Image (cartoon, rainbow, N blue to C red):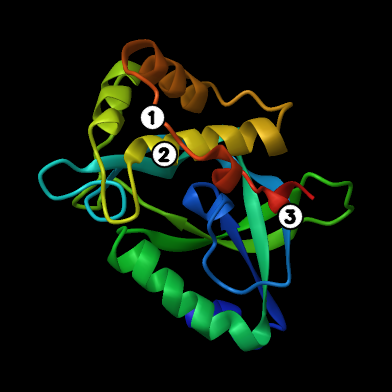
Amino acid sequence: MKLHDLVKGKSSLWIFGYGSLVWKPGFAYNRSKVGYIKGYKRRFWHGDDFHRGDKEKPGRVVTLVSDQEACTWGVAYEVPECQIEESLQYLNVREVLSGGYATEMVEFIPKEKSPDSLLALVYIATSENPIYLGPASDKEIAAQISICSGNTGHNIEYLHRLAEFMRLCCPEVEDEHLFSIEAARSSVFRPLSLNCSTIFSLFLCL
C-alpha cells in the first residue's frame, strides 16, 4: 500500500524518529511522546554523503535493522491533518532524497503509562540503498564518525546528541551499540567542543 493511501482520511499522523528527528524534527506537530518500537535495533550502518558527510568521506548515521528480540527508543510526533502533506514533503527531501530512507508503518509504545499503542510512520534505510555501509567494529565506526562532516554539521555532533537524548529521556535504557561507539570515539579522539546549552534543550522529555 502506498504512503498516500495509509494516511488518507486520518485526522493526524504519528511520525517516529530514532536518529536526528529526536532533537530536530523540522516540521510542525501537536505533541510528542518518548517511547519505543519492537522488532528493530538501531545501528550506525547507513552512509550519509549530504547531512553528516560528503561523497569522498561519507558519515555514519543510524538506521533500523530487523531483530525480533530488540526494541528501539525514540520520539513520536503527532502531526495534525492540516500539516501532514507539508510534513511529508519536507521529510521526503530530508530522509528519502537526501538520506536514502524508505517508509514503513510500525507500532509505537509510549513510555508514559498508556493502555494503547499508536501506529506511526518511520523511515528506514536498508542494505539495498547505494550508500548503505553495513556493519563494522565500534572502533571503525567511531574513527569514521570522527573525520566526517556535512551540510548539517559534524558527524560527532550527531553521535553526541543521540547519546545525550538517550541519557536524558531514557536513562533506564542501555543502548550498548550507541554507547560503545561513543566510548570508542572518546577513548581515541579528543572530544569535539559543543554548545551543550543549545544542543540539549530537550523539551521532548516533558
| Location of residue 6 in the rendering, given as x and y in whole percent from the top left corner | 57, 77
Q: CA distance from mark 1 to mark 3?
A: 30 Å
Q: Position of residue 72 (x, y in %)?
A: 59, 39
Q: Nearer the viewer, residue 151 or 142?
A: 151
Instruction: Write down the residue under mark 1.
Output: 192
N-term-proximal mark, 1 vs 2: 2
Q: Residue at x 64, y 88 (%)?
A: 82
Residue 129 in sight: yes
Inspect the image, locate mark 2, and give the three-letter code of the amino acid beneath it: Glu
SS assignment at label 1: loop
Q: Which residue is mark 3?
A: 33
* Mark pair 3, 2: CA separation: 23 Å
Task: Give the SS element for disc 3.
Answer: strand
Q: Residue at x 43, y 79 (%)?
A: 89
Q: Whole-Å distance between the Cαs marked 1 and 2? A: 8 Å
Amino acid at pointer 3:
Lys
The mark that comes first in sequence, 1 or 3, is 3
Q: Is residue 45 visible?
A: no
Amino acid type assigned to the residue bearing label 1 in the image? Leu
Q: Is the residue 161 above or below the residue 29 in the image?
A: above
Depth check, mark 3 against mark 2: the one in front is 2
Question: Which residue does the image show at 62% across and 46% down from the upper left?
Answer: 74
Q: Which residue is mark 2?
A: 157
Q: Which mark is residue 177?
A: none
In the rendering, at what x and y percent does residue 147 appear? 23, 32
Tell me if label 1 and label 2 are in contact, CB under 8 Å: yes
Q: Is residue 50 above or below residue 178?
A: below
| Label 1 with label 3: CB-CB less than 8 Å | no
